């Protein structure tokens, strides 16, 4: 008799997006959830207190060992636990490669061997701005190569997976300070502390900032549909970094240009040999910031 597949794995489950996904699944489904996180960017503050959720502090390189006892009960793996900052990937190149290449290879191998469905978080940084801004950093490069690996696993072994491209995600539980902070998190923190908002030059870099709720709903949609597709989840509106800073109605301080900086978040209809299905978020960044400013008055 086959055991019931009633477990979802979330790598990076103590992080910004992973913790929001776990919270969503706890409310929406009856699945048990196991989080694997090395807490390099994640936090125990993001833990969902629920009997259906378990947390393991570990690197994804150890996924086979951690999940050996329950591998036959796993329905899917949401792989969010990778190094995910552009500029920092130059400063911590070995850490980036260790996580995004070696660690991710173990996740792919685990899913392949055990015939477990994978939902992989890709990044708009791999798509580029009509090819001009493609793979400008170690982070983007490793993520791009992972997509090529998935393509080969599908071709040779009929590996089942969904790919969801994230676009500058913001919202509850975002990281607001430190080297792994997000742009919106940094601005929000600086605004509430009455500090100048720091904009990396030139400030004209455009982004399709996407709320985490819209991102998570697309991940759930992809998982539920089970079509083995590539999806983008972004917002229709694109803002420059300087435009966003000025939405907070505060002072702006410019920082020097950084290596790997992208100048536009691109959408695409095809990546590698895959048609990309475009999904657009409902929550607009401008209204999100307006609410923050109103609450501060």
Image: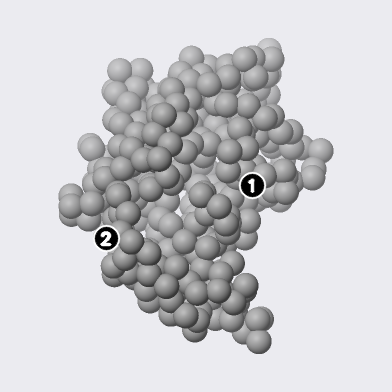
Image depth: mark 1 or mark 2 in front: 2
Can you tell which mark lies on residue 122?
Answer: none
x, y percent for residue 179: 51, 49
Residue 33 picture quarter: top right
| Pointer 1 residue | 19
For numbered disc 2, what is the local secondary structure?
loop
Between 26 and 43, the one lying in front of the other is: 43
Is residue 170 found left or right of 45 in the rendered image?
left
> How busy is the neighbourhood of tag 2: few (under 14 within 10 Å), some, or many (20 plus)?
some
Residue 188 picture quarter: bottom right
| Pointer 2 residue | 263
The image shows residue 48, relative to residue 238, as above or below, that is above
The image shows residue 201, relative to residue 39, as above or below, that is below
Q: In the image, what residue occupies the spot 42% across and 44% down? A: 88
N-term-proximal mark, 1 vs 2: 1
> How busy is the neighbourhood of tag 1: few (under 14 within 10 Å), some, or many (20 plus)?
many
x, y percent for residue 45: 72, 49
């Amino acid at each position: 008799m086959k055991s019931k597949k009633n477990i979802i794995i979330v790598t990076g489950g103590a992080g910004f997006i992973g913790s929001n996904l776990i919270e969503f699944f706890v409310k929406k489904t009856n699945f048990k959830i196991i989080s694997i996180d090395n807490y390099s960017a994640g936090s125990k503050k993001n833990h969902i207190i629920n009997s259906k959720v378990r947390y393991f502090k570990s690197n994804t390189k150890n996924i086979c060992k951690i999940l050996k006892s329950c591998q036959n009960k796993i329905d899917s793996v949401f792989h969010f636990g990778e190094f995910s900052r552009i500029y920092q990937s130059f400063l911590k190149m070995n850490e980036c490669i260790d996580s995004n290449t070696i660690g991710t290879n173990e996740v792919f191998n685990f899913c392949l061997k055990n015939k477990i469905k994978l939902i992989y978080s890709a990044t708009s940084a791999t798509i580029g701005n009509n090819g001009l801004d493609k793979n400008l950093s170690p982070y983007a490069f490793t993520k791009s190569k992972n997509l090529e690996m998935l393509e080969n696993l599908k071709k040779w072994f009929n590996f089942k997976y969904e790919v969801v491209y994230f676009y500058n995600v913001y919202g509850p539980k975002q990281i607001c300070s430190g080297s792994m902070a997000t742009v919106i998190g940094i601005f929000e923190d600086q605004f509430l502390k009455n500090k100048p908002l720091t904009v990396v030059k030139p400030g004209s870099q455009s982004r399709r900032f996407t709320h985490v709720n819209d991102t998570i709903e697309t991940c759930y949609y992809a998982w539920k549909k089970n079509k083995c597709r590539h999806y983008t989840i972004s917002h229709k509106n694109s803002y420059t970094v300087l435009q966003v800073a000025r939405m907070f109605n505060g002072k702006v301080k410019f920082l020097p240009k950084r290596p790997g900086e992208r100048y536009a978040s691109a959408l695409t209809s095809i990546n590698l040999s895959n048609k990309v299905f475009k999904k657009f978020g409902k929550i607009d960044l401008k209204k999100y910031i307006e609410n923050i400013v109103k609450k501060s008055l």
